[in-house]
Structure formats: C-alpha cells, structure tokens
Image (cartoon, rainbow, N blue to C red):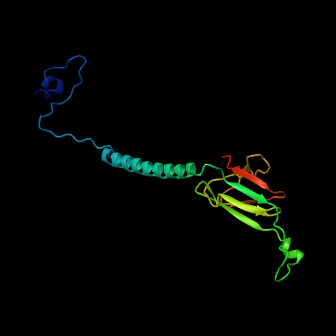
Amino acid sequence: MSAPPSIAEREGGARPGRPLLPAVPHNVRVEIVSGPLSLRALAIAGLVLFALAFYHGRQLSELDAAAAQSSAPPAVVAAPAPPRPATAAAPATSAQLAQPAVVTVTIRLLKFSPEQIEIKAGDTVEWKNADLTPHTATASNKEFDSGSINANASWHYTFAQPGSFPYICTF
C-alpha cells in the first residue's frame, strides 16, 4: 500500500519560488472583514467630521466678519464728573455724589460687551469672563493690564483720571 499523494504531487510537483497552495475554484466569493470598524463606517465618520468642521468654520467666519465691522477696539471713556446743577429739587449729600459706580463688561464668544462704555473719574470697570478660554483686558497704552482672566472669573480696575482707554485681549 502506498501513501496518498501529497499536495505537491497532485498540483504537478513543487516549483521553486512558488508556495504550495491548494487549487481554488473560480466561483468562490472572498470577503475581507476589517474588524469592528468597516470602511463604510470610517467613510461616514469622516463625512460627519468634515460637515461639523465646515459648519464650525462658517460660524467663526461670521464672528470674524462682525469683529471686522467694528473697526475701533473696545474702549473705556472716563469723563470728568459733571458739575452739580445750580437748582436742585432735593440737594444731594456729598456721600451720594462721591459714590463711585461699578460698570461690568462681559467677555463672551471672544467679544467684549458692551464694546464702549463711558464712566466718570473714580468709577470702576469690572471685566467678567463668561467664555470658555482665558482672556485679558490690556490697555493699548499699557495703563492697565489684567493678566489672564480665567473662565468664570473677573478682574476690575478703577480709573482715577478722565480719558479714552482703548483695550484688547492680548491672547
């Protein structure tokens, strides 16, 4: 009794440089499975990410266009205290006239609101950061500089003299 023929003998003998593979019928369907993420899922995820980035970019360009429309940077205008009226129905006490005001500027969506305010000498401006990232309130003439105002934090500055004080976020 002889042993059954080997694959090499059935296929016509072993040839150098060619692997020994069994014969595959021509009507067999081969599918490649790539694991938990198929090529279709990756393509759909890529399209969704592209659409989100496109929409986000459009929103940022609208904010940029709105910022470009307001050519002047935000400013604090500190004016001298108005003179007291000569005739007053009820005379104001010196304590009432000396009360400094606190004006709030909110930072939201990379923008100061209100953009321009007018205060009297001695009044205080408070910058509240309602944005997700830190910001600064830095005067163009470097008279004041808040440093980093973190998200949900605030910083204030009291203006002693009248004038116009344009400011920016240095970040």
Nearer-the-camera pick, 108 or 9? 108
Residue under the point 78% across and 46% down: 142
- Horizontal and vertical percent for residue 18? 23, 21
Residue under the point 84% across and 58% down: 160
Residue under the point 67% across and 52% down: 135
Query: Does residue 12 sit above or below 80 in this rendering?
Result: above
Residue with the most extreme bottom position:
90
Judge left or right: residue 74 versus residue 47: right
**Quarter of the picture holding the N terminus:** top left
- Horizontal and vertical percent for residue 147? 74, 50
Image-quadrant location for residue 113: bottom right
Query: Does residue 131 sit above or below 13 in this rendering?
Result: below
Image-quadrant location for residue 158: bottom right
Residue with the most extreme front position:
86
Callout count: 0
Nearer-the-camera pick, 41 or 12? 41
Judge left or right: residue 10 versus residue 56: left
Nearer-the-camera pick, 81 or 35? 81
Residue with the most extreme top position:
16
- Horizontal and vertical percent for residue 78? 77, 59
Residue under the point 17% across and 40% down: 29
